[in-house]
Amino acid sequence: MPIDLVPSPSGEDDIIFVIEGDEVIRSALHFILDDKNETHSFATLDLAYSGANVVTPDLVLLGIGFLQDDGEDAVAAVTRRLPGAKILIVANSVNDPLALKALRWGAHDVLGKPISFDSVRGRADGLLRRQNVSASMLGLLPPSAAW
């Protein structure tokens, strides 16, 4: 019997901010995410902070370039100015040393390039939505595990 894991929708579109200096990458990320989310794209952190006066993001995709000069302060500022938002660092590799430091500074995950529909949506969905075990799976668990 296959395990049926189903994303648990929040009831309305999640709000995602894509903050990326590279216009091509920013546009691609926006395109990938916009059909299932309310997506807003920004070339700078200041523009994103201004956008937060209108809507509050649930997820922020933050380009690694914003961490080059003072990464720890940049992550702290995003956390402070966009409270409650999960931070997904967009890096050249999931093993990028600066991206791994960002995880220690409070970012939630890393998206490595090359980006694809599956990789972007998978990481975003993983950070935004809980996975629910289907009711049919509860029959496979011992009674003590059915909480």
Image (spheres, grey):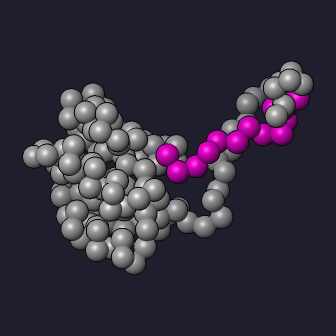
Which residue is nearer to you in this view: 128 or 102?
A: 102
Residue beneath the point at 52% across and 43% down: 126
Residue beneath the point at 52% across and 62% down: 14
In this rendering, the answer to whether 108 lies above or below 56 is above
Residue beneath the point at 27% across and 59% down: 19
Tell me residue 4's x, y (percent): 73, 36
Q: Which residues are magenta?
A: 127-139
Left of 38 or right of it: where is 129? right
Residue beneath the point at 22% across and 51% down: 74
Left of 83 or right of it: where is 126? right
In this rendering, the answer to whether 21 lies above or below 126 is below
Displayed quadrant of residue 147: top right
Please identify the residue farthest to the left as the structure is shown: 69
Please identify the residue farthest to the bottom as the structure is shown: 54
Which residue is nearer to you in this view: 80 or 88?
A: 80
Left of 102 or right of it: where is 136? right
Tell me residue 119's x, y (percent): 42, 41
Please identify the residue farthest to the top as the structure is shown: 142
Residue 49 is inside the magenta segment: no
Displayed quadrant of residue 95: top left
Residue 43 visible in the picture: no
Which residue is nearer to you in this view: 144 or 5?
A: 144
Tell me residue 26's x, y (percent): 27, 59
Tell me residue 120's x, y (percent): 41, 47
Residue 27 visible in the picture: yes
Left of 3 or right of it: where is 25? left
